[in-house]
Image (cartoon, rainbow, N blue to C red):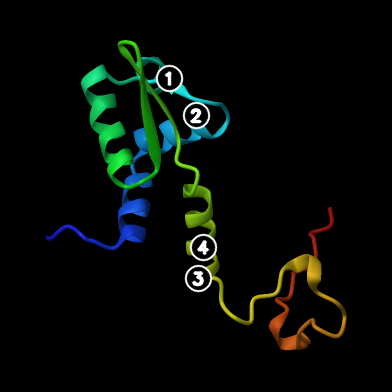
Amino acid sequence: MSRSTDPDVRLLAALADPVRLSIVRQLAVGDAVCACDFTESCGVTQPTVSHHLKVLREAGIVTSARRGSWVWYRLAPEVVGRLVAIGRELVPADFIRAGELTPSRRRPVSADAIPSVPPAPTS
């Protein structure tokens, strides 16, 4: 199987791994995080964390900066916008949010579509 060059595929594939998703979630709630802090929170070894951070960097999800002997990571500024854009592409054109439904926009439900419920047994 060949590797996709589509940046959206690479983004979603990178996020599909539980460890990488955990890293991204940790970065989403805070500022920069040192690479050494991911080993404890993700429950994996440092070489494994390094591999996952490399995949996230190559997918454009994280950026890194060296501070002395430590490397600090943060979410790439454009990653949230990329995820929102992908999500919008997947929403059907006729999609209506539940909060936007008004009586005139609700579809009528026929009586045949409602399942019948047997009466509760009496004792």
Per the rendering, the mark at residue 41 is 1
Q: Residue at x 50, y 70 (%)?
A: 90
Residue hosting label 4: 85
Residue hosting label 3: 89
Residue hosting label 2: 26
- Disc 3, SS: helix
Looking at the image, which residue sits at the far left?
1
Is 40 drawn above or below residue 28 in the view shown? above
- Disc 1, SS: helix
Which amino acid, by three-letter code, is at mark 1?
Ser
Q: Are marks 4 and 3 in contact (CB under 8 Å)?
A: yes
Q: Mark 2 or mark 4: which is in front?
A: 4
In the rendered image, residue 48, in percent from the top left (x then y), is placed at: 24, 25
Give the distance between the C-alpha atoms of the residues marked 3 and 1, in whole angstroms: 33 Å
Q: Residue at x 76, y 88 (%)?
A: 110
Is 74 drawn above or below residue 110 in the view shown? above
Q: Residue 67 falls in which quadrant of the image?
A: top left
Which amino acid, by three-letter code, is at mark 3?
Glu
Q: Are marks 1 and 2 in contact (CB under 8 Å)?
A: yes
Which amino acid, by three-letter code, is at mark 4?
Ala
Mark 1 vs mark 2: which is more N-terminal? 2
- How many numbered circles does the render carry? 4
Q: Is residue 38 left or right of residue 109?
A: left
Q: Mark 4 or mark 1: which is in front?
A: 4
Mark 2 vs mark 4: which is more N-terminal? 2
- Disc 2, SS: helix
Q: Mark 3 or mark 1: which is in front?
A: 3
Per the rendering, the mark at residue 114 is none
